[in-house]
Amino acid sequence: MTETRILVVDDEAGPRESLEAFLTDLDYQVETAVDATTAIEKIRKTSFDIIITDKNMPDTQGSVGDAGMHVLKFATENSPETQVIITTGFASLENAIKAMKMGAFDYLIKPFSLANLETIIERIITYRSFINAPQAFSNYRSLHNEILESMEQSTLSEEGRNTLLRAIEEQIDDSFKVRKRLENIIIEQRDSLATIAMHAAILHEKLTPVHDSESADLLAKISYIADRRL
């Protein structure tokens, strides 16, 4: 966990400091920013794995605005491998869809459960471990957006929608876990083939001088097949 760098952006000291303490206790490397301008400067200088930013922060003139969305926009354009989690005290499915379409990984409504946040962070770390991490993140966002858009027509309350969304996310996680297991099998097979190819090549070199042509040819063939399948 110590290799995961997280930037927490919130103009309110209480939530910002609470998140910093919570994430530090989980052994993440945590930095904070009190506004969008400071956050953007930090993103310019440091590579963060995850950004957790409040959506509703004052703009540069001090008026209430969506400065957190500026952080999201800058991060997605300048640090595409960084995953952004948007937080807000104002529940709105429309805002959630907008944030996801702009590239946010997820969306949390204040006050949110720290356990939910931890789950999202662990999900990001898991998806980052895929061989093709960008594709894993893209697939997750596509599924997430489809679910959010289908919920727009729902008569459920915001709380009900949020509860349903989290339940569906768990199902998405289960499907990704299956993919991860399959990927691990592929990696193990690749490593085994690499070992076979290496040992076959070594034995081929040792047998060639003593003119064991049949064994040498067989080893050469094994090495060739293993190489092709890597």
Image (tube, grey):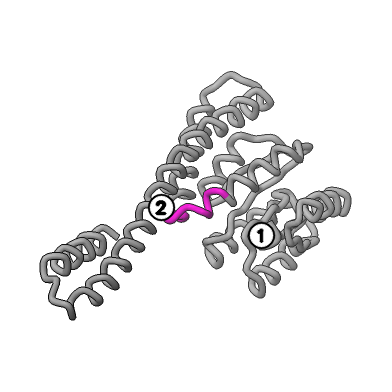
- Which portion, as a residue range, is magenta? 126-134
Instruction: Give the residue at mark 1.
Output: 4
- N-term-proximal mark, 1 vs 2: 1
In reply to whether residue 127 is colored magenta, the answer given is yes
Q: Position of residue 183 (x, y in %)?
A: 41, 48
Mark seen at residue 188: 2
Q: Residue at image x 70%, y 42%?
A: 117
Q: Is residue 166 left or right of residue 150?
A: right
Between residue 136 and residue 105, name the one nearer to us: 136
Q: Position of residue 105 (x, y in %)?
A: 57, 48
Q: Position of residue 24 (x, y in %)?
A: 80, 56
In reply to whether residue 48 is colored magenta, the answer given is no
Q: Is residue 168 left or right of residue 3?
A: left
Q: Residue at image x 51%, y 38%?
A: 144
Q: Residue at image x 52%, y 49%?
A: 127
Q: Determine the image quadrant of residue 215.
A: bottom left
Mark 1 residue type: Thr
**Is 34 drawn above or below residue 180 in the view shown?**
below
Q: Residue at image x 70%, y 53%?
A: 53
Q: Position of residue 9 (x, y in %)?
A: 75, 57
